[in-house]
Image (cartoon, grey):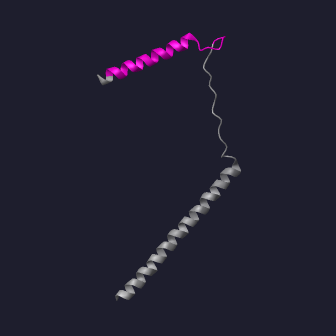
């Protein structure tokens, strides 16, 4: 096999490989677009509204002292454990 024949074979294999990759990418783009249209047609692309949770408040609109005390105690306990961990 001469150098010229090897170069010709290399060029053919290169073109064949590039064609296969291009065809695969083209097919993948078509599939992604089709799935996107199907999802939109089925209405599955709607945003889900998050649940609104409200902090319990007393009659004047302030957070109850019990909840404030519980949060404060939890934060202090967390800080105490973290401080003990690093000592």
Can residue 70 be seen in this snapshot? yes
Q: Residue lying furthest left in this view? A: 87
Q: In the picture, which quadrant includes the C terminus?
A: top left
Q: What predominant SS class does the magenta segment belong to?
A: helix
Reply yes or no: does residue 59 show up in magenta.
Answer: yes
Can residue 1 be seen in this snapshot? no
Q: Position of residue 84 (x, y in %)?
A: 32, 20
Instruction: Give me the residue at 36% from left, 20% from top.
Output: 81
Instruction: Give me the residue at 68% from left, 50% from top.
Output: 40
**Vertical placement of residue 67 versus 6, above or below:** above
**For residue 78, side relative to residue 55 (left or right):** left
Q: In the picture, which quadrant includes the N terminus?
A: bottom left
Q: Nearer the viewer, residue 11 or 1?
A: 11
Magenta highlight range: 58-84
The quarter of the picture where residue 66 lies is top right
The quarter of the picture where residue 34 lies is bottom right
Instruction: Give me the residue at 46% from left, 17% from top.
Output: 74
Reply yes or no: does residue 46 show up in magenta.
Answer: no
Instruction: Give me the residue at 67% from left, 54% from top.
Output: 38
**For residue 12, side relative to residue 52 (left or right):** left
Q: Position of residue 33 (x, y in %)?
A: 63, 58
Q: Position of residue 14 (x, y in %)?
A: 45, 76
The quarter of the picture where residue 30 lies is bottom right
């Amino acid at each position: 096999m001469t150098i010229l024949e090897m170069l010709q074979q290399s060029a053919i294999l290169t073109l064949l490989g590039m064609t296969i990759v291009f065809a695969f990418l083209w097919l993948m783009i078509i599939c992604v677009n089709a799935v996107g249209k199907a999802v939109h047609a089925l209405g599955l692309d709607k945003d889900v509204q998050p649940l609104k949770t409200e902090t319990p408040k007393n009659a004047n609109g302030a957070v109850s002292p019990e909840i404030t005390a519980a949060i404060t105690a939890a934060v202090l306990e967390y800080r105490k454990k973290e401080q003990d961990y690093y000592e």
